[in-house]
């Protein structure tokens, strides 16, 4: 589904990703680990097509089509959707108003909101005045009603979330990924208690250093940190 080949990316001429290779096979859930500042979120924003992330070399291929030259809207139309860790706040726009205008809900806003337990803040501003758990649910709600989405990017869905909300977040992600593919960033690995991933990658200093079993890699990181991931054998999917 998603193939990233020898990708090098810059922001204002500063290299943030270099010679990066990663794949998410059709129908699989892939986890991306990495220390703070390693470039994980930069990779996600490059995949969705934010303009300040300039591809210098390499290629992003989605369903056998290069998307390097497509803008954000065109990539969304192909089915790429993202849950942001820190979504932008939009003044004067309510969450319910936004999803009603952006997505075809067939008049079922309240029904859909109740399913994801966002009804209590559906009248609040978009990403304004929400707790950590509410913000995650708001982002997932937008993914849930986006029927065009075929591939999901989740940027730290387990950060700043209490146990009650984490259980709900995990259930929603599993629903979204039941028959689709996704790539998840996680620092703590808590999301793996709820979502069974097929493969994990480790990103360090803007490139992929390691890949393999999500559980094995997480345990190694917990025991030894990221130092043991440098140059380790990669066990990702074959071309």
Image: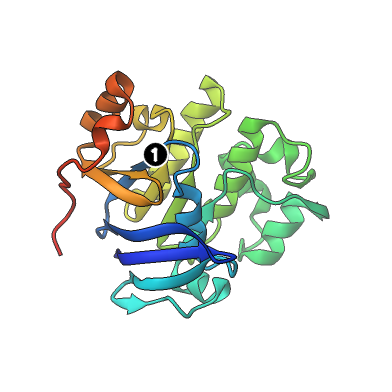
Q: Quadrant of residue 53?
A: bottom right
Q: Position of residue 80 (x, y in %)?
A: 46, 64
The residue sitting at 49% across, 78% down in the picture is 70
Q: Position of residue 234 (x, y in %)?
A: 17, 47
- Colour mapping used in the image: rainbow
| Image quarter in which the N terminus is found | bottom left
Tell me, yes or no, if residue 152 can be seen here: yes
Q: Position of residue 13 (x, y in %)?
A: 55, 66
Q: Above or below — where is 138 with respect to 146?
A: above
The residue sitting at 49% across, 37% down in the picture is 36
71 and 220: which is toward the camera: 220
Q: Secondary structure at mark 1?
A: loop
- Relative to 90, is 218 on the left or the right? left
18 and 105: which is toward the camera: 18
Q: Quadrant of residue 67?
A: bottom left
Tell me, yes or no, if residue 147 can be seen here: no
Q: Above or below — where is 191 with respect to 30?
A: above
100 and 53: which is toward the camera: 53
Q: Above or below — where is 190 with respect to 176?
A: above
Label 1 neighbourhood size at 10 Å, few (<14), some (14-19), many (20+)? many
| Image quarter in which the C terminus is found | bottom left
- Relative to 138, is 17 on the left or the right? left
Q: Residue farthest to the right? A: 92
- According to the picture, the residue beneath numbered tag 1 turns out to be 34
The residue sitting at 31% across, 27% down in the picture is 221
Q: Position of residue 58 (x, y in %)?
A: 34, 71
């Amino acid at each position: 589904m998603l193939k990233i080949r020898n990708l090098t990316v810059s922001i204002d001429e500063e290299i943030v990703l270099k010679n990066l290779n990663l794949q998410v096979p059709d129908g699989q859930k892939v986890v991306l680990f990495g220390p703070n500042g390693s470039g994980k979120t930069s990779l996600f924003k490059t995949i969705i097509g934010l303009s300040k992330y300039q591809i210098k070399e390499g290629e992003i291929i989605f369903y056998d089509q290069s998307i390097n030259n497509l803008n954000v809207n065109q990539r969304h139309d192909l089915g790429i959707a993202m849950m942001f860790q820190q979504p932008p706040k939009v003044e004067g726009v309510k969450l319910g108003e936004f999803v009603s205008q952006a997505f075809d809900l067939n008049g079922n806003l309240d029904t859909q909101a109740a399913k994801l337990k966002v009804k209590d803040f559906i009248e609040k501003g978009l990403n304004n005045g929400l707790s950590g758990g509410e913000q995650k649910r708001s982002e997932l709600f937008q993914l849930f009603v986006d029927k065009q989405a075929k591939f999901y990017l989740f940027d730290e869905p387990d950060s700043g979330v209490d146990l009650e909300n984490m259980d709900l977040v995990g259930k929603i992600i599993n629903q979204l990924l039941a028959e689709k593919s996704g790539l998840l960033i996680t620092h703590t690995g808590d999301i793996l208690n709820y979502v069974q991933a097929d493969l994990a990658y480790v990103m360090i200093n803007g490139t992929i250093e390691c890949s393999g079993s999500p559980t094995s890699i997480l345990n190694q990181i917990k025991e030894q940190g990221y130092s043991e991931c440098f140059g380790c054998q990669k066990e990702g999917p074959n071309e």
